[in-house]
């Protein structure tokens, strides 16, 4: 019988149904929207160069001035990709559609030859940045790049779901460990476990990081957590990976607890059920809310 079923005095089919019916649609906290610390840091790294380029706003002799600036302050060229919403140090542009000839533009150099200056000025003019600045459609390049950084950061939101899940899970782990006077470590490797607790853990990949490890006397509990708002092949591969890993951990008397949530699972229940059937603990946020972790660790 599944350990959680025994603990909750419920049959496996009913427990699995309760688990899947309790999946959250979202875990949108305030940190989800924009990582302002990262945005402000990225902008500050280019603020000097952007302020140099601000003199181009409304410049009557734009082509002459940009050449002058690139020649005198070559460091300003590193801002060019970001002005287009791109995080690259170099770009290849297809300049001949029939012969498929590409021209490489390098924005990382700090000493430029005349031909390199010509090339970078050409990129600045032909990529469309000139029109925005020359016609004063942009009032301040620092503010403009701030907006671009916010936009680029929004692409990272899908990755923030995992981090938010870790943060929420850790709050419950801290509460459980304080209540039961247990130790835990986040983002832990076998080397850290050996160093801190003197316990040898064997893994196929020594660099493998476990989201959380709880120590109860000489027994370890490995915890992995994730959130899937949408479906995809990743869900099946994760379940398959955890089935295999948990087999190795059982051989070392390590208890594995998988905490997962998100409506993405509703499109891929079969691999989740396969994991559930292995007898390991499978939890969601609703169960954590009901103090199941404390009951397991007791």
Image: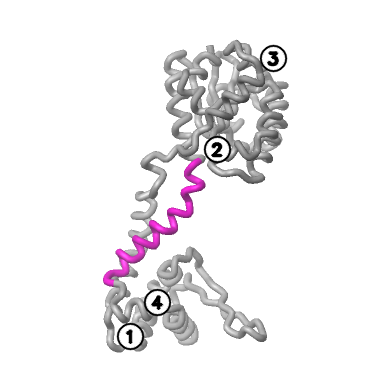
Label 2 vs label 3, nearer the camera:
2
User: Residue 1 shows which numbered tag?
Assistant: 3
Task: Give the alpha-carbon distance from disc 1 to disc 4, as whole Å.
Answer: 11 Å
Instruction: Indicate left or right for 270 with 47 as reference.
Output: right
Q: Secondary structure at mark 3?
A: loop
| Range shown magenta | 139-161
Label whose residue precedes the other's in the sequence (2 or 1): 1
Q: Secondary structure at mark 2?
A: helix
The residue at which mark 2 appears reads as 263
Q: Establish if 51 lies above or below 233.
A: below
Task: Give the alpha-carbon distance from disc 2 to disc 3, as whole Å.
Answer: 26 Å
Q: Residue at x 39, y 39 (%)?
A: 29
The residue at which mark 1 appears reads as 62
Neighbours of disc 4 within 10 Å: few (<14), some (14-19), many (20+): some
Q: Residue at x 57, y 13 (%)?
A: 8
Task: Give the alpha-carbon distance from disc 3 to disc 1, as whole Å.
Answer: 76 Å
Instruction: Give the percent coordinates (x, y) of residue 164.
Output: 46, 38
Neighbours of disc 2 within 10 Å: few (<14), some (14-19), many (20+): some
The residue at which mark 4 appears reads as 129
Label whose residue precedes the other's in the sequence (1 or 4): 1
Front-most of residues 206 and 145:
145
Instruction: Indicate left or right for 149 with 187 as reference.
Output: left
Q: Secondary structure at mark 4?
A: helix
- Residue 220, by quadrant, is top right
Pointers 2 and 3 in contact (CB under 8 A)? no
Task: Give the alpha-carbon distance from disc 2 to disc 1, as whole Å.
Answer: 53 Å
Task: Give the alpha-carbon distance from disc 3 to disc 4, as whole Å.
Answer: 65 Å
Label 2 vs label 4, nearer the camera:
2
Front-most of residues 277 and 75:
277
Task: Give the alpha-carbon distance from disc 2 to disc 4, as whole Å.
Answer: 42 Å
Q: Establish if 217 lies above or below 160.
A: above
Q: Establish if 286 lies above or below 41.
A: above
């Amino acid at each position: 019988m599944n350990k959680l079923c025994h603990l909750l005095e419920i049959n496996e089919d009913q427990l699995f149904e309760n688990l899947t019916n309790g999946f959250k649609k979202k875990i949108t906290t305030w940190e989800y929207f924009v990582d302002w610390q990262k945005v402000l840091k990225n902008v500050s790294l280019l603020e000097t160069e952007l302020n140099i380029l601000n003199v181009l706003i409304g410049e009557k002799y734009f082509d002459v001035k940009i050449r002058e600036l690139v020649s005198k302050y070559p460091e300003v060229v590193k801002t060019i990709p970001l002005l287009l919403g791109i995080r690259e140090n170099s770009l290849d542009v297809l300049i001949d559609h029939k012969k498929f000839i590409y021209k490489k533009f390098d924005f990382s150099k700090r000493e430029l030859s005349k031909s390199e200056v010509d090339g970078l000025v050409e990129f600045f003019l032909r990529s469309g940045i000139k029109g925005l600045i020359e016609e004063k459609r942009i009032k301040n390049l620092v503010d403009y790049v701030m907006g671009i950084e916010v936009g680029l950061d929004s692409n990272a939101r899908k990755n923030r779901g995992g981090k938010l899940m870790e943060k929420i899970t850790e709050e419950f782990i801290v509460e459980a460990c304080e209540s039961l006077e247990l130790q835990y470590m986040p983002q832990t490797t076998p080397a850290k476990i050996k160093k801190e607790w003197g316990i040898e853990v064997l893994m196929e990949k020594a660099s493998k990081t476990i989201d959380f490890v709880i120590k109860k006397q000489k027994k370890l509990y490995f915890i992995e957590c994730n959130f899937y708002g949408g479906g995809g092949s990743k869900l099946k591969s994760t379940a398959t990976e955890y089935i295999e890993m948990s087999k190795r951990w059982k051989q070392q008397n390590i208890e594995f607890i998988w905490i997962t949530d998100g409506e993405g699972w509703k499109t891929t229940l079969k691999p989740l059920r396969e994991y559930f059937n292995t007898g390991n603990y499978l939890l969601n946020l609703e169960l954590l809310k009901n103090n199941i972790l404390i009951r397991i660790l007791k």
